[in-house]
Amino acid sequence: MDKTRLRIAIQKSGRLSKECQQLLKGCGVKLNLREQRLIAHAENMPIDLLLVRDDDIPGLVMDGVVDLGVVGENVLEETLMDRQAQGEAADYSVLKRLDFGGCRLSLAVADDFDYQGPQSLEGKRIATSYPWLLKRFMDEQGVKFKSVMLNGSVEVAPRAGVADAICDLVSTGATLEANGLVEADVIFRSKAVLIQSGNALPAGKQQIVDKLLPRIQGLQQARESKYIMLHAPKDKLEQVIDLLPGAERPTIMQLAGETNQVAIHMVSSEDMFWETMEGLKSLGASSILVLPIEKMME
Ligand SMILES: Nc1ncnc2c1ncn2[C@@H]1O[C@H](COP(=O)(O)OP(=O)(O)OP(=O)(O)O)[C@@H](O)[C@H]1O
Ligand SMILES: O=P(O)(O)OC[C@H]1O[C@H](OP(=O)(O)OP(=O)(O)O)[C@H](O)[C@@H]1O
Ligand SMILES: [Mg+2]
């Protein structure tokens, strides 16, 4: 592998892979991703991608095997605590918290379990893939328990008689429900993060990172923003602008052949609800459009 090219580790297949690939594509990185390949070279930038299991990403970054990585904070924090316990180096920095991979690590019990708080789990067996995060929480609560380490299918452990409760990732809660479990306590909230190895990067690689970061920021900001356009009667302009979400500096334009109506254009970082649109309409506004924004640079 060419050492001058920036190496980024992302999940090969799973919850983070599609969004990681989209993020890089959005940043203008042209990827040549072929099935079953562990390394992909960008065509238009000196970037190589390593496609790996998400569990391996923090270690690869902390050992300096790759320069950057995208991983869930849950896996990052778990690896960090594990490395600290083993006395291994764990040098890295978080460059950016990303807007995907949102989930929580929660304790869950069977729906007929009388859960009155973490102390209800005193002396119980808890199945998890995150023994360190679980131990930290239970130590804070002063509750002793037995950890049952499982790498997958944690949610079947109570039914299989392997554990009394579980500590696993939850997003919609559908997996818990399908397994007759209920969420009891949230112990950690996670999102995907972009991390960098602790070593200072050579100038060439640093330049690429300096290019990528504002682009990621621009993509995230664009995703949170909307472009709003509408026509409004001139005599209701102030009331219309008051209703618009986050309209500090709207552009007001004359409409050709119209003396009583103007066009209003604005970028809003807030959501435009149907109720607001209905309110605008009742003030006489028309042609109200709410458009997604692809990229943004301020
Ligand atoms: N239901 C979910 N919704 C959103 N994000 C999630 C969800 N479940 C997990 N995640 C996030 O995505 C990461 C990867 O989840 P995934 O289930 O793909 O991992 P995995 O099965 O361990 O994959 P791998 O084969 O790479 O080890 C998790 O560590 C977490 O940060
Ligand atoms: O609350 P929910 O929306 O149901 O999501 C939670 C599930 O999502 C993740 O698994 P995933 O579906 O990625 O499959 P995996 O178990 O193969 O990792 C996680 O491990 C949970 O099992
Ligand atoms: Mg994994």
Image (cartoon, helix red, strand yellow):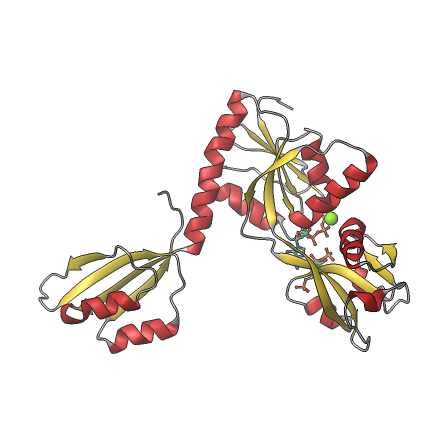
- Relative to 193, is 204 on the left or the right? left
Q: Quadrant of residue 197?
A: top right
Residue at x-position 38% and y-position 53%: 293
Can residue 28 be seen by looking at this rendering? Answer: no
Expressed as whole percent of the image width and height from the top left, the position of residue 232 reads 20, 68
Placement of 69 over or under 295, stated as above or below: above
Counting labels gives 0
Expressed as whole percent of the image width and height from the top left, the position of residue 122 reads 87, 64
User: Depth check: 178 or 76 in front?
Assistant: 76
- Relative to 218, is 32 on the left or the right? right
User: Depth check: 257 or 197 in front?
Assistant: 197
Q: Quadrant of residue 145?
A: bottom right
- Relative to 75, is 97 on the left or the right? left
Placement of 143 over or under 5, stated as above or below: below
Placement of 123 over or under 180, stated as above or below: above
The C terminus, quarter of image: top left
Expressed as whole percent of the image width and height from the top left, the position of residue 59 reads 72, 36
Q: Quadrant of residue 155?
A: bottom right
Can residue 280 be seen by looking at this rendering? Answer: yes
Residue at x-position 57% and y-position 53%: 100
Expressed as whole percent of the image width and height from the top left, the position of residue 238 reads 21, 67
The N terminus, quarter of image: top right
